[in-house]
């Protein structure tokens, strides 16, 4: 069974005065998963992504990447050389 590369468990974000931006969000991603975040203006999309990136740490619940660290991303490829990228 594949291990998740990122998990969130019962994550919430409250801003003054007691406004819930996110409430009770749980999710997990498998390696190589492609995701999209959709929602209305002010629905919490940017807040969710800031939490996932580790920028916003003042949250309820738990949000964590897998224990391994990946400091590079494989390139999607180009028409001339699949799997490569240019600086």
Image: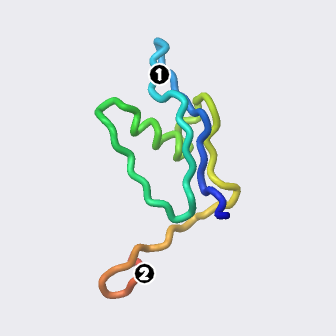
Which of 11/1 is in front?
Answer: 1
Position of 46 compared to 67: left or right? Answer: left
* Residue holding disc 1: 20
User: In the rendered view, does 87 fall on the left or right side of 61?
Assistant: left
Spatial CA span between label 2 and label 1: 43 Å
Q: Residue at x 70, y 56 (%)?
A: 67
Q: Residue furthest top?
A: 17
Q: Quadrant of residue 79?
A: bottom left
- Decide: is 33 above or below 6: below
What residue is disc 2 on? 84
Foreground residue, 7 or 71?
A: 7
Q: Earlier in the sequence, mark 2 or mark 1?
A: 1
Residue under the point 49% across and 61% down: 33
Question: Which colouring convention does the figure follow?
Answer: rainbow
Q: Where does the image place residue 17, in percent across and percent down from the top left?
A: 46, 12
Q: Judging from the image, what secondary structure is the residue with disc 1 in?
A: strand
Q: Position of residue 9 (x, y in %)?
A: 61, 38
Q: Quadrant of the N terminus?
A: bottom right
For discs 2 and 1, the disc positioned in front in the rendered view: 1
Say which residue appears at 56% left-offset and 59% top-offset: 30
Q: Does dot 2 land on a helix, a strand or a loop? A: loop
Residue 37 coordinates in the image, percent (x, y):
38, 46
Residue plotted at (29% across, 34% down):
40
Residue at the extreme bottom: 80
């Amino acid at each position: 069974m594949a291990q998740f590369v990122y998990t969130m468990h019962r994550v919430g974000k409250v801003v003054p005065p007691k406004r819930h931006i996110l409430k009770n969000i749980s999710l997990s991603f498998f390696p190589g998963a492609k995701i999209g975040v959709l929602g209305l203006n002010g629905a919490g999309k940017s807040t969710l992504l800031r939490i996932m990136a580790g920028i916003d740490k003042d949250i309820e619940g738990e949000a964590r990447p897998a224990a391994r660290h990946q400091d590079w991303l494989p390139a999607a490829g180009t028409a001339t050389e699949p799997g490569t990228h240019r600086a």
